[in-house]
Amino acid sequence: MPPALTAPKTRALGLCGALVVALFAVAAFAPLPFTLTQPGVTADTLGTYQGRPVLTITGAPLRVTDGQLRATTISATNAGERITLKQAVDGWLNEDEAVLPTDVVYPEPDPADAVQETSRQMTESQDAATTAALNYLHLQGGQVKVTVDLGDIGGPSAGQMLTLGIIDKLSGNGHGGDLTGGRVVAGTGTVDDQGRIGAVGGVPLKTQAAARDGATVFLVPAQECSDAGVNLPPGLQLVPVTTIEESVAALNALNSGAPVPHC
C-alpha cells in the first residue's frame, strides 16, 4: 500500500474505534426500561413493625403467641428511576438481585400513581385478610375489629401472613398451641375473602429475605413452587399452599411431625 494512504486509513480506523467506544460508553450509562429488585424487609405479623403493632384486634380475647409469622417483601428502585446497562448486567450476574421490566413492577407509569396503587392494594389486602381469618374462625366481623399497620409496606402480597397472624392471635392451632410451633415462619401470597391464596412474584428474592431474618419455613403459593426453588437458601423449607386452610394444616403437620407438602 502506498505510504501516502497509510496515515489517513490509520486515522479513520482510530476515529471509528473511538466512536464505537463512545457509543458503548453512552449505552452503558443510558437509562433502560428495567427495575432493579433486591430482597426487602420482612415484618412479623405477630409482633411490631417500625415500632408499632402490626395487628391490633379488639372484641375478642387474644392469645400470647410464640414464634413469628413474617410477611416478606422485595425492594425495588423507584417507579420513575430507570437503571443503566451496567446496573442491569451487574443485577443479572448477582444472585441477590433481579432485573425486571419496569412495567411489570410498576404497572402504573406515573410514580405518584404507582405509590397510590400499591397503597390501595395493601388496603384491600388487609380487608381481605381480616375477612378470610374471621370466616375461617366462624367469627362475626361486626364483633371483632382488626386494624393493620405495616407502615410503608405496600401491595397485596402480605395477605396470607396477615390472615395467619390474625388466626394465631385469636385461636392459635385450635388446640391451645401456636401455629408457628415456636418457629420463625415466613411466606407470601395474596388472599381473598374466601381464603384462597394467589401468586405474587419476586419469590426467589423473598426466600432470601426470609432466610436472612431467621425463617426456617416458607409458605409459598403452590403455583410459584418452581420459582421459589431458584437460589433457595439452604435450611429453608418450602411449603406450597393454595388456601388458608392448607396453610394452617401444613403448620399443624409440621408441629406434630406429620408429612408436609413440599415443592
Image (cartoon, rainbow, N blue to C red):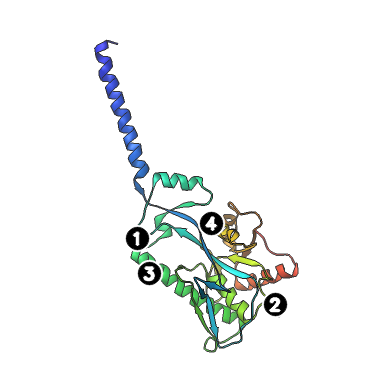
Q: Say what secondary structure mark 2 lies in.
A: loop
The kind of residue tagged 1 is: Pro
Which of pointers 3 and 2 indicates the residue nearer the eye? 2
Q: Say what secondary structure mark 3 lies in.
A: helix
The kind of residue tagged 4 is: Leu
Q: Mark 2 = which residue?
A: 177
Q: Mark 3 = which residue?
A: 116
Q: Quadrant of the C terminus?
A: bottom right
Q: Say what secondary structure mark 4 lies in.
A: helix
Residue 191 lies, in percent from the top left, at 53, 71
- Mark 1 neighbour density, 10 Å: few (under 14) some (14–19) many (20 or more): few
- Mark 3 neighbour density, 10 Å: few (under 14) some (14–19) many (20 or more): some
Q: Say what secondary structure mark 1 lies in.
A: loop
Q: Quadrant of the N terminus?
A: top left
Q: Mark 4 = which residue?
A: 205
The kind of residue tagged 2 is: Gly
Q: Distance of mark 1 from mark 3, alpha carbons? A: 12 Å
Residue 109, numbered label:
1
The tag earlier along the polypeptide, 4 or 3, is 3
Residue 99 lies, in percent from the top left, at 46, 51
Q: Which of the 4 image quadrants contains residue 78?
A: bottom left
